[in-house]
Image: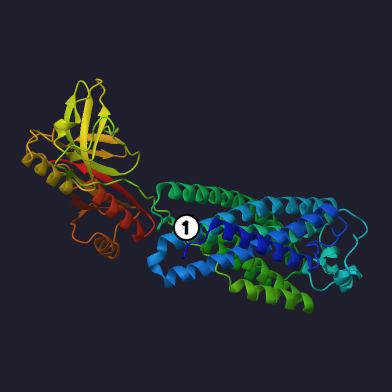
Amino acid sequence: MVEMRMSNFKTICMLACFLSALSVAAQQVRPRIAGLEGNAAYMSLLAEDGRLQQREDSVVRAVERTRLQLRDHPEQRQAYSGEILRLEEAIFSIRSARGKLIDRINTIEQEWVLSNLHVATPPPVSATEAAFAVPDSLKRRYLVDNLFFRENLPTPDYEALLRAQRLERVAEEYVRRYKENYRQMQELAGIYDTVRNERAAADLEGKFRTIEGMNRVLSDSLTQTWSYIFDNKTYAYNYLLDKLGAEEELTRREEAMDAARRRLTDLEGAYSSDAVTDYFVQKQLVDDYEVGLARMLGLGEARDSLAAAVQRLSGVDYLLPPIAWRERFFLDYEPLVFSAAPIYNYRNPIPECRVYERGTIYRILLGTFRDKPSPSIFKGVSPLGYLRTAEGRYAYYAGGFETRAEALDARDRLKERGFKRPEVVVWNDGHASNLTEADAGEAIAFRVEVLGEEPIGEQVRRALAAASPGYELTRVGDRMVVVGPFEDKASALRAAEAIRGVGAGLTIKVSEIGG
C-alpha cells in the first residue's frame, strides 16, 4: 500500500525531530556577529533556528524521496500527491516558525550594530576572530576594517561604511529566505496543477498567496537595506578614488555603473523580484569595485577574500522567472442520463443548482414554474437542479456541459424525448445568458484580442499561431492581432492562457461577438 498512514507519518516526523535535536545539540552554536556571544536570548534563538533547519532538511529529503516514487509509479499519483501535500504542510509550518525566529535574530543584530558604531573600545571577540582584535593596520580580511579607510574618510562616512558592511549579512539573509520561499512556491504550483480536489486546491492557493506576501515583504526589506549598503559603499569608494587622484579608475567605475544601470533597466519587471535582481547586479559591481581598491592599496588578503566572493557570486542563478499560477476551475460537468423511472422523489428531492463564481458551464433550461412541480414530469432525466428567478419562480436545469456544442447536442436529445422547448443557458463567471433567446440566426461567439506595447512582428505572430492552432489570425493595425472566432468562451479562455506564454508585453482580452 503506497499511501502512508498518518500515525506512521507522525512517528517518522517525531523521530526526525529527535535525531535533529541530537545533531544540533552536538554542534557548537556560534554567533553570526562577534560581540553577541554573551547575549543569552540571541544564542538561544540561534540554537532554535539550527534545530528548525535540521527538521526542515529532514522533511525536504522525505519530499524528494516521495517525488522519486511518484516518478517511478505514476499510476499512484493521487496517493503520492496527497503524501507530498502533507509533507509540504509540515515544511510550511517549519519555515513560518523560522521566519519569525530569523526576524528576531536580525532585529537583535541590527540593534547591536547601531548601538556599537560609536563605541570607543572594540567589543569582545571570540577566539576564532581574535585576529580582528589586533591593531587596525593588521586588519586585512575585511576591506573596510583596514586603517586606510578610517584615516582617509570623514568620521560620519566611515561609520556609515562600517554599518553598510555589517548590514551585508542582513541583505544576504533576506535573499536566502526569498529564494527558499520561491522554491516552495514552485513546489506548491506543481502540486496545485495535479490535485483533483477543490478544497485541496484552495488550501494550496492560500499557502501560495501567504508565501507570496512574505516575499513581497522580503523584497521591500531587501530594497531598503541594500540601497543603504550600495549608496554608502559606492559614495565612500568614489570619495577615496577622487582623493587619491585616480581619475582613470574613477572613470572606469562610472562606466561600469552606467552599464549596470542599463542592464537593470533591461531586466526590470522581467523576473520574479526586481529587488533580488538589483541586489545581484549591484552586488557584483560593488564586489568588483572592492577587489580593485584592495589591489590598488596592496591589501593582498582582503583582495583574495573578495576575489573568492566574486567567484562564488558569479555562479549564482539570480534571474528567477515569475511563477505561473494558472487558476483552475473545478466545475462539475455532467452529461445527461435518461432513466426508465424518475430518480428524484420526496426522499431524494431535486437539489438547488450550483452557480460557479469562476469559469464557464452550459446547462439546459427545461422550464420555469410558479411552484415546485412533481419530479415525474421530467421523464427520468438527470442530473437536475433548480434556481429561483428574480420573479420568485422555479427554473429547472438539466446537465452541465463544458462546450456550447455539447449543450446543443443535449438540447436536441431532449427534444427527441418530447421536451417542447429546451433552452441552452451559459454561465460565465457566475453570470447567466440564455443563448436560445437570441434572435434566429444570431450566433454568439468569442475572440481573443492580443495587444502589444510595440508593433507586433512576424516572429510574435508565428508564436501566436502556434499557441492557437486551427484558428484564424487577423491583424488590426500594427499593435493588435485578433484570434478566432471561438464557438464558446471556454475554448477562447484556453487559447488566451496558451497565448500568455508567448512573451511579456502583450495584453490579452477575451471578447464576445455576435452575428
User: Which of the 4 image quadrants contains residue 373?
Assistant: top left
Is 325 or 94 nearer to us in this picture? 94
Q: Residues within 10 Å of mark 1 (few under 14, many from 20)?
A: some
Is 190 or 474 nearer to us in this picture? 190
- The amino acid at mark 1 is Gly
Q: Position of residue 84 (x, y in %)?
A: 50, 60
Q: Is residue 387 left or right of residue 159?
A: left
Q: Position of residue 371 (x, y in %)?
A: 21, 21
**In the displayed structure, would residue 375 be above or below residue 483?**
above
Residue at 59% x, 56% y: name it. 90
Q: Position of residue 277 (x, y in %)?
A: 56, 61
**In the displayed structure, would residue 250 be above or below residue 276?**
below
Location of mark 1 (residue)? 82
Is 150 or 106 nearer to us in this picture? 106
Q: Is residue 100 left or right of residue 369?
A: right
User: Which of the 4 image quadrants contains residue 296?
Assistant: bottom right
**In the displayed structure, would residue 68 be above or below residue 46?**
below
Q: Is residue 503 left or right of residue 342?
A: right
Q: Is residue 337 left or right of residue 185?
A: left
SS for callout 1: helix
Query: Is residue 41 in view?
Result: yes
Is 205 or 478 nearer to us in this picture? 205
Q: Position of residue 92 (x, y in %)?
A: 58, 54
